Amino acid sequence: MAQTIALEGIILFATMALQNGVDVKTVSTMLGHHNAGFTLRTYTHTTRQAQDEAAEKIGAFMEQMM
């Protein structure tokens, strides 16, 4: 059980750090990963908030284009 809690804590740390703008290389180094791609594949999840923000950015960009 202690390992499960520790693992869940790492997952939460990595996910929250990435979602709040900490660059992936820094998070990767802090977790001891040799490859930032592994960190991205493992700990990034598309959230509803991220999707909404992306849609707003794309919409604003498209309006400027027209």
Image (cartoon, rainbow, N blue to C red):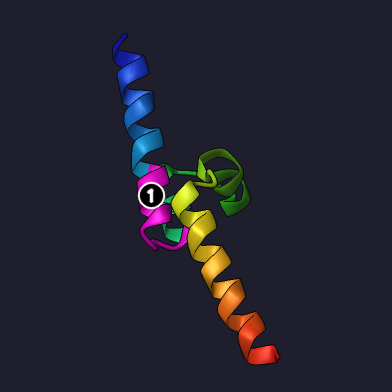
Q: Which image quarter holds the C terminus? A: bottom right
Look at the numbered disc 1 and give the secondary structure of its residue.
Answer: helix
The residues colored magenta run: 14-24
> Could you tell me which residue is drawn at 44 percent across and 53 percent down?
49
Q: Is residue 44 left or right of residue 10?
A: right
Give the farthest residue toward the right: 66
> Could you tell me which residue is drawn at 36 percent across and 16 percent down?
4
Of residue 64 and residue 13, the one placed in the foreground of this image is 64
Q: Is residue 17 magenta?
A: yes
From the top left corner, tell me how far across and down residue 3 is, in percent.
35, 16
Q: Is residue 52 left or right of residue 17?
A: right
Up-down: is 35 above or below 22? above
From the top left corner, tell me how far across and down residue 15 is, in percent.
42, 44
Amino acid at pointer 1: Met
Of residue 50 and residue 13, the one placed in the foreground of this image is 50
Up-down: is 54 above or below 35? below
From the top left corner, tell me how far across and down residue 56 is, in percent.
52, 70
Q: Which residue is mark 1?
A: 30
Up-down: is 9 above or below 65? above
Magenta segment's dominant SS is helix
Few, some or many residues within 10 Å of mark 1 (<14, 14–19, 20+): few
Q: How many marks?
A: 1
> Could you tell me which residue is drawn at 52 percent across and 46 percent down?
44
> Could you tell me which residue is drawn at 38 percent across and 61 percent down?
22
From the top left corner, tell me how far across and down residue 65 is, in percent.
69, 90
Q: Which image quarter holds the N terminus? A: top left
